[in-house]
Amino acid sequence: MPQPFVLFDNVCKYYQMGDTRIAASDHVSFEIQKGEFCVILGPSGAGKTTVLNMLGGMDTCDEGTILLDGEKVSGFDKKRLFYTQGDYGLFQCSEPCCQETYDNDKLIRQMVEAQGYIIAPDGQLTVPENTILKTYIPSELVPHCPHCGKLLTMNLRSDDSFVEDAGWHAAAERYSEFLRRHEGQKILFLELGVGYNTPVIIKYPFWRMTARNPNATYVCINKGEAVCPNEIAKQSLLFDGDIAAVLAQIK
């Protein structure tokens, strides 16, 4: 029997709701061979999204092992990611008075629950029967900077107030080092839905690096804006359409 392409071995994922710990994935085990087509079925809250998020590296498991083509993805190392444009999961001072960011997952959950929603283990929101949702949050949940007291805001690049903290700079260096190590080698620059708000961050660098490397391939999936310079046309694959629809057709 060949080594499975996907392996889940006793994988568990837990979420804390108040004093209660809920198992979104409870000792899940399965194998998928390369080339097999599989469907995950189950009612809302069964953990389907949780399983796929862990497989895709967007979430981590608390117990067990996940292998993708022999490579371990359970406990996905966030050091392999570079949120160059910011991270919705972080707050920063709106001033900003300092170059620090703050994890906001716990507080956002409290805000959502204070409005009347119930957060399922897989992240889905439900509204209890006969519940009227609030359109506000309690004042005590409004986040303020621990240093200057100003309001906190999302750590997203929108103007020159964007905070590039120590973690951002460390990730930028790891990304640069990755590019240096693979210079001239076969490499895929995959661009999903990148527009022209800040093209100098992702789009233009991808074009330049593709042009400099004859072994590179540039792939763009972008509805209405799937374009590239003529200089790299022979090294490019452009898909003008919805990302989910295009990926489904490719499969």
Image (tube, rainbow, N blue to C red):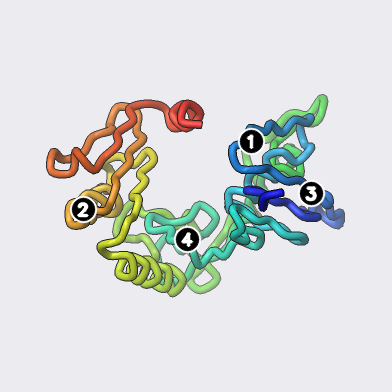
| Three-letter residue code for mark 1 | Glu
Is residue 104 visible in this depiction of the protein?
yes
Instruction: Estimate how packed mark 3 is, as few (under 14), some (14 to 19) or many (20 or more) residues with alpha carbons within 10 Å.
Output: some
- Whichever of labels 3 and 2 marks the residue nearer the N terminus, that label is 3
Label 1 belongs to which residue?
36
Where does label 3 land, which residue?
A: 29
Q: Depth-wise, is mark 1 or mark 4 nearer the camera?
A: 1
Q: Determine whether the residue tagged by mark 1 lies in a helix, strand or loop.
A: loop
| Drawn side of residue 83 relative to residue 158, left or right | right
Which comes sooner in the sequence, label 4 or label 3?
A: 3
Label 3 vs label 1, nearer the camera: 1
Q: Assess disc 1: are there few (<14), some (14-19) or many (≥20) residues with their C-alpha within 10 Å of its C-alpha.
A: few
Does residue 201 appear to the left or right of 66 in the view shown? Answer: left
Front of the two marks 4 and 3: 3
The residue identified by callout 2 is 214
Whether residue 109 is visible here, answered yes or no, is no
Q: Could you tell me how far apart the alpha carbons at marks 3 and 1 are, in whole angstroms? A: 16 Å
How far, Cα to Cα, is label 1 from label 2? 33 Å
Amino acid on which the number 3 mark rests in the picture? Ser
218 vs 22, nearest the viewer: 218
Vertical relation: 218 (above or below) 142: above
Distance between the Cα atoms at labels 4 and 2? 25 Å
Is 251 positioned to the left or the right of 241 in the image? Answer: right
Looking at the rendered structure, which numbered label has been put on residue 81?
Answer: 4
Contact? badges 4 and 2 (CB < 8 Å): no
